[in-house]
Structures are given as C-alpha cells and as structure tokens.
Image (cartoon, grey):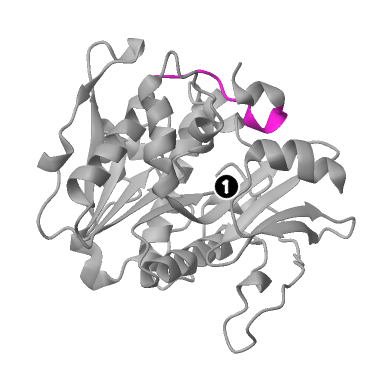
Amino acid sequence: MAMATSYSSMAYPPITSKTPFPNKQVSNWIPTTISNGNGTGGMFSVARRNSRIGVQVHAVTGDQGSRNVSDVKFPSDYPELLMQAKEAAESALKDGKQLLEIEFPTAGLQSVPGSRAMTFCDGEGGNEMTGSMLLIREFCDRFVPAEKATRTRVFFPEANEVTFARQSAFEGCSLKLDYLTKPSLFEDFGFTTKVKMADRVRPEDETFLVAYPYFNVNEMLVVEELYKDAVVGTNRKLIIFNGELDRIRSGYYPSFFYPKLAVLSKTFLPKLDAVYYIHNFKGVKGGTLFRCYPGPWKVLRKATSGSYICLHQQEEMPSLKEVALDILPSV
C-alpha cells in the first residue's frame, strides 16, 4: 500500500500524463505584475490572496559571530519566500553543493499537496501552472545575475510548455529555455518521446533549473539523466524547482509498477540537498515542515495569535510520515 494512504497530506492521484495549460490562450495572458528585476517586484494575484501574518520561530543558540540561520521566519508572502529561497540556494552553492531542491506550495502558503494535481485537467489547474511559471521567473530574476542569464538553462517538462513560456512569463528574457520530453501521439496513455539530454546541453551552460518535473513519472528519470550526463564531474549546478519529490520518497509509486523510480529513491534523491522546503499538514494537529539552508529542519504550528511557533527541529530531514504521525500529534 502506498505511504500516501496513511496520512492526509500525501493525497495524490496516480497521474502519468498531462495536457499542459488547458484552456489557455497565450494572447489573453496578462500578468498582474512582473518583477522589476531588482528583487522588489510585485507578485501575481495568487500570491496576494495570502494573508500577511507575523511569524515567530524559536531561535537556537549557536555561534554568535555567524549569521543565525535559525532565526529565519516562515515567509509572509511569495516575494519574501523567493528571497529566502534565493539566499538559501546561494549559501548552498558557496558551500560546494551541486544538486539542490527547492519545494513549496504554489496554491497558497497554507495549502497542502494534492489540490494542485487534482485540478490539472480543468481551468484552475492551468492557472496554477501559469502561476508556477511566474514564480520561477521571479526566482530567476533574483537568483541569476544578468551576466549569467545566457549560461543558465531552464528545463520545462514538455516542449509545448517552452513555447508558452517564451510567449508569456519568460518573454524577452535572456535565459535559455529547454524541455525534458516531447509529446507523442500516445501521450494520453502516458507515452512521450525520449529526449537525449546530452544533446540539449551546450558547453557554456553553467546552471540548470528544472521546473516542476512531477506530473509524468518519466520526467524525474530524465532529470537524473541530465545530472549524470551534464553535471557529474563538472562545475555545473542543477536545481529542481517544485519537483514534488516526496511522492517518490514516500513510496507513493509502488516499486512493482515503477521499478526505475524505486531505484531513483535510493541512488539519486539522497544526493539532493533540500535547501528551501515547505510542506503543510492539515488537521487539528496540523503544522508545517520548514527548512531554509543552512538552518535546521523545523516543525512549525500556527498559534492562536496567528504567528508560528517552532515545535521541533533537527539537522536531518524527517520523513513526512514521521512528522504527521509522531511529531505533530505529540505536541
């Protein structure tokens, strides 16, 4: 039985193929606001729906001469979140990390996993994918220096998403846009055309950012190929942005039916450094698993005042099952 059935926060449907951006018309795509490139730009309407609440996190003693990363607060909105993610990624790269993971909910800072995947086949799902693309553009505006833009390659799951990105959120930018898979005539049955990743990379590439490679199970296998063929043994960096890797970690995909993913959970995922991470748990004893590199992993819960308190923290990432069944119910 899949781990997801044991606790509510992992309620994902078994989806293996998609039709990106359903009911979307590129000519009608009008963002509310776009970043001005200096890290202070606004955010689209999805972000503004989130309340701006104060957050208090218990600090941890440490070297007073260094930056107290334990004092990083849960973000109050998406612009603050993206700045935290940028700083976390930069710190990890300075420490020699090469394979990074950034994961957070895009339907609202309080949302739980599952709602996004369940609505991909309707207009709401298409809007959320558009929102994810905008968030990635905003992150790149903060994280990628102008002189590095042409040496940064952003991979989207499919070729038609690249077309949409170039005509919408990424219009006019210098970032290199690419794709992991190409749709086939049998896409509705889960089949896609394999793309040889070594052919997609150019010698001048320095950083790869992979956008939400989770809807088709083959996408993460291609990401591993990209890592092996173009990152290992080089100075290049690879960042997986909202890949929902907890599905693979939790054993949601039965190893009997998905043997390659089962191997991936043992060979590839342990190499990842989750430098920025938010996962919400619903229920009376709900809470949030939060991490901003190089700080510890924290389990937070909203207080009656609307702020957050830290219930538990540790250096290693706890499993979602451990947080949901052991940590949160005990406090």
Q: How many labels does the image show?
A: 1
Q: Is residue 151 above or below residue 164?
A: below
In this view of the protein, can residue 241 be seen by the observer? no
Horizontally, is 86 left or right of 8 in the view?
A: left
Residue at 19% across, 49% down: 230
Tell me where residue 163 appears, x and y as whole percent: 24, 38
Residue at 42% across, 42% down: 269
Q: Tell me which segment is drawn in magenta.
A: 7-18
Find out whether residue 204 is within the magenta segment: no
Magenta portion: prevailing SS class = loop
Which of these two is toward me, 143 or 119?
143
Q: Name the residue under label 1.
A: 46
Which of these two is toward me, 214 or 162?
214
Image quadrant holding the N terminus, namely top right
In this view of the protein, can residue 266 be seen by the observer? yes
Tell me where residue 80 appears, x and y as whole percent: 57, 65
Q: In this view, does 23 lie above or below 27?
A: above
Q: In which quarter of the image is residue 226?
A: top left
Callout 1 amino acid: Val
Tell me where residue 53 appears, x and y as whole percent: 75, 61
Horizontally, is 113 left or right of 209 in the view?
A: right
Horizontally, is 90 left or right of 303 in the view?
A: left
Residue at 53% across, 64% down: 293
Tell me where residue 100 appears, x and y as whole percent: 40, 54
Which of these two is toward me, 250 or 117?
250
Q: Is residue 193 above or below residue 138?
A: above
Work out which residue is located at the far bottom of the displayed protein and give it. 65
As helix, strand or loop, the secondary structure at mark 1 comes to helix
Report crowding for label 1: few under 14, some 14 to 19, many 20 or more residues within 10 A (C-alpha): some
Q: Quadrant of residue 68?
A: bottom right
